[in-house]
Image (cartoon, helix red, strand yellow):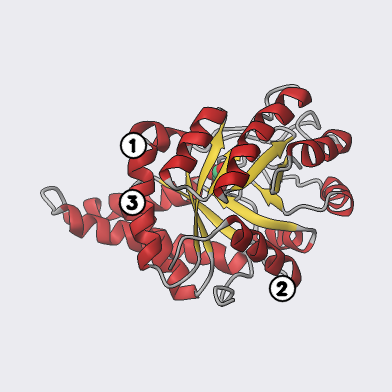
Amino acid sequence: MNKMTRNEIVALYERGKKEGFAIPAFNYSDIWDMMAIVKAAEEAQSPVLLMCDPPTYEEFGGRLCAAMADVVIERANVPVIHHLDHSESPENCLEAMEYGFNSVMMDASNLPIDGNIAAVHKVVEKAREKGVFVEAEIGRIRGDSSYETSYTGDDYLFLLEEAKRLVEESGCDSLAIGIGNAHGFYQGEPEINFGKLKEANDNLDIPLVLHGGTGIPRDVVRKCIAGGIRKVNVGTAVYCAYMNGAREKLMADGENQFTYDVMEVAMDSVKKEVAYWIETCNAVGKAAK
Ligand code: 13P
């Protein structure tokens, strides 16, 4: 497939709104799980977002990530968006765009609102020139994809007035909102604040993004989609499926195995996990325009 332009990505989010699905978005670690994610999307004929998280970007560099994704996208028979996830620096976003990422997240949600707006605006200016889609974040989405975390209190929920200002003044294309979601595994049942989601959906004319998909039950994710969520981020569940698949094969057949034989099983494990989330997002069969 050709690389999608910002206009095409905007149109896909709009189709999600009309047809009641969210774009499933997955963090990758390397080329094996990147390929597994896209294979699962092809089998389900779903659009998909490949997300490069900061440690992967740091380790591989933007050029290598973009080069791998470009070939995978070119070969894919479904729409695939390549996204830089949780970049806390405008410079990384600008660099990723130069290398060919067609979607970036400028996450300045840890800054006071004026700083958040300024950072996102800086990225949006360049992104418009290059036809790249920009996600911003409001409210804090706690935790780190690699460890367990829990939901407590309302401190992390977004404030509507700030969200309105961020959307209007930065020009971002989509918005991740803190509604009680958190990265990593939840220690108990996640407590999604549907009142806050409704407030965002009623007052902000922009696709809303749910981070911290791992551990949120399917019916709760679908309720979020019905409430206006248009992209669901899943990281930890993909990483764990990948490692668990590899571990099971190593445990079953012992040491001294070929990399490919282990990776084949790891990729199958990733594909199963990704297929579950594609279905959860109501995205099966939504690849076609
Ligand atoms: P999880 O690791 O909790 O699925 O969150 C992933 C995410 O939101 C990436 O931005």
Q: Which mark is residue 19?
A: 2
- Residue 147 is situated, as x and y percent measured from the top left of the image, at 51, 34
Residue nearest the observer in this picture, 188 or 158: 158
Q: Residue at x 64, y 31 (%)?
A: 122
Q: Is residue 97 left or right of residue 139?
A: left
Ligand 1 shown in quarter: top right
**Label 1 belongs to which residue?**
60
User: Residue at point 26% right, 56% down?
Assistant: 263
Query: Helix, strand, or loop for circle 2?
Result: helix
User: What is the x, y in percent for residue 164?
Assistant: 84, 40
- First in residue order: circle 2 vs circle 1: 2
Position of residue 253 in the picture relative to residue 91 (left or right): left
**Residue 169 image point, x, y percent:** 79, 36
Q: Are marks 2 and 1 in contact (CB under 8 Å)?
A: no
- Amino acid of disc 1: Phe
Q: Which residue is mark 3?
A: 68
